[in-house]
Image (cartoon, rainbow, N blue to C red):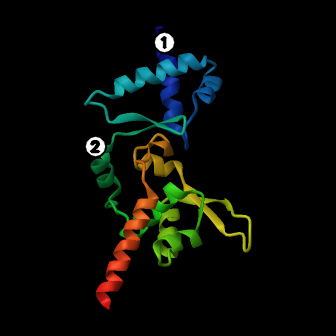
């Protein structure tokens, strides 16, 4: 199907200005097009943006779509904003891994798994928009539950949490216990 340039431009404009990923249904409603037509436009734009002379790409996140820059363009954007790329500390990465695989999870559960306090790492992840408070757990004190955000998915190039690599937590915990036992025996 041939699309009028106005319809393609409409999809581009919506994807550019949206603060969060837009579903096909929502774009179709706004543009007064069928969902099938919007899906075809998205596919056409994704093909256009694959060209090496284009700095944009369309990200799919949680069933929605967002226009963004290709990862290879990050250097230019950092220079523009003069914000050096700040990585996450190993503690923050550890906490982020726990939250992403165990969510929803409380601070107490994170601290138990890590064996140390995680206040600072959690605050950093919330500040960077990678995690957020998603509710409260039933029970004494009603502790805050944490989960990942769409920004987390975008940052790590994931379409959904199902794209996370599979981990076998039981075997990891057994390895850590064995390592701790070896250290304890070496201390004696």
**In contact (CB < 8 Å): disc 2 and disc 1:** no
User: Outermost residue, top direction?
Assistant: 1
| Mark 2 and mark 1: Cα distance apart in space | 30 Å
Q: Nearer the viewer, residue 80 or 125?
A: 125
Q: Residue at x 34, y 74 (%)?
A: 179
Classify 10 Å Cα crowding around label 1: few (below 14), some (14-19), many (20 and above).
Answer: few
Vertical arrangement, residue 26 with respect to residue 182, above or below: above
Residue bearing mark 1: 3
The label on residue 72 is 2
Q: At numbered mark 1, what does the secondary structure look like: helix, strand or loop?
A: loop
Pointer 2 local density, CA inside 10 Å: few below 14, some 14–19, many at least 20: few
Residue 128 point in image, percent of width and height: 47, 61
Residue 12 tag number: none
Residue occupying the point 54% across, 16% down: 37
Q: Position of residue 111 (x, y in %)?
A: 52, 74
Question: Does the rendering let one see residue 135?
Answer: yes
Residue at screen point 46% across, 40% down: 159
Q: Is residue 172 above or below residue 54?
A: below
Q: Quadrant of residue 67?
A: top left
């Amino acid at each position: 199907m041939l699309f009028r340039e106005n319809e393609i431009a409409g999809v581009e404009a919506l994807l550019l200005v949206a603060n969060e990923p837009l579903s096909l249904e929502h774009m179709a409603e706004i543009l007064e097009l069928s969902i099938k037509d919007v899906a075809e436009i998205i596919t056409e734009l994704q093909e256009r943006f694959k060209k090496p002379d284009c700095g944009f790409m369309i990200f799919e996140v949680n069933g929605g779509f967002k226009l963004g820059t290709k990862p290879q363009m990050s250097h230019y954007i950092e220079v523009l904003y003069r914000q050096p790329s700040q990585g996450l500390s190993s503690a923050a990465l550890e906490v982020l891994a726990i939250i992403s695989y165990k969510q929803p999870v409380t601070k107490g559960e994170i601290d138990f798994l890590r064996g140390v306090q995680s206040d600072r790492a959690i605050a950093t992840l919330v500040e960077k928009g990678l995690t957020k408070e998603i509710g409260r757990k039933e029970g004494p004190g009603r502790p805050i539950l944490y989960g990942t955000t769409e920004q987390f998915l975008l940052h790590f190039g994931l379409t959904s949490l199902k794209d996370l690599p599979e981990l076998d937590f039981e075997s990891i915990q057994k390895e850590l216990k064995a390592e701790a036992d070896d250290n304890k025996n070496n201390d004696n």
